[in-house]
Amino acid sequence: MLYTIRLQDMEFRAYHGCYDLEQVVGNRFVVELTITTDLGAVAEDDDVEKAVSYLTVYEIVSDVMRIKCRTIERVAQNIIDALHERFPQICETECRVTKIAPPLGGKVAKVSVILKMQN
């Protein structure tokens, strides 16, 4: 049986961007994850050690957000790669990275990319 974990509206101050100034002054980002994983014996055994820990997921995302990247596509890919490395039982991950108020020369509330990876 499969189950889904969603982490929504994780907000970070980070230094991603194609402009050098963005990598100096930073910006606000929001990350959202939908992770589908094999239930295995998690529910039957009521064993958190067998589960995909959403605390650990959050810590992984937080660590990855500290790594400067030029594109939010790379940020999303780094998050997915790190999650799949730590939790091989993950079947599918959808990662949305949103930059709040991107510097595009006009008023834009946010821009997002969504990457999805299946094992």
Image: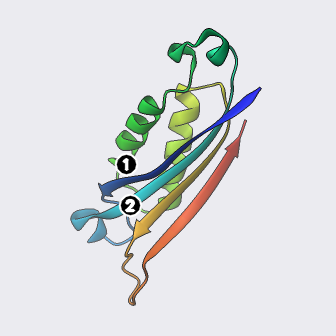
Residue type at the position of mark 1:
Met
Q: Residue 101 in the image: x percent, y percent?
A: 37, 76
Residue type at the position of mark 2:
Phe
Q: In the rendered image of this protein, does residue 57 appear above or below residue 79?
A: above
Q: Quadrant of the N terminus?
A: top right
- Asked whether 26 or 2 is in front, the reply is 2
Q: Residue at x 30, y 69 (%)?
A: 22
Outermost residue to the bottom: 106
Q: How many marks?
A: 2
Q: Residue 85 in the image: x percent, y percent?
A: 55, 29
Q: In the rendered image of this protein, does residue 97 appear above or below residue 93?
A: below
Task: Tell me which corner region of the image, top left, top right, bottom left or bottom right, holds residue 110.
Answer: bottom left
Left/right of residue 50 with respect to residue 23 in the rendered view: right
Q: In the rendered image of this protein, does residue 38 appear above or below residue 77?
A: above
Q: Residue at x 22, y 67 (%)?
A: 25
Outermost residue to the top: 45
- Circles 1, 2 touching at the beta carbon (< 8 Å): yes
Q: Residue at x 38, y 60 (%)?
A: 29
Q: Residue 94 in the image: x percent, y percent?
A: 62, 49
Task: Tell me which corner region of the image, top left, top right, bottom left or bottom right, holds residue 119.
Answer: top right
Res. 4 mark: none
Res. 29 mark: 2
Left/right of residue 40 with respect to residue 22 in the rendered view: right
Q: Residue 52 in the image: x percent, y percent?
A: 55, 26
Q: Residues within 10 Å of mark 2 (few under 14, many from 20)?
A: many
Badge 1 marks a residue whose secondary structure is helix
Kindly identify which residue carries mark 1: 65
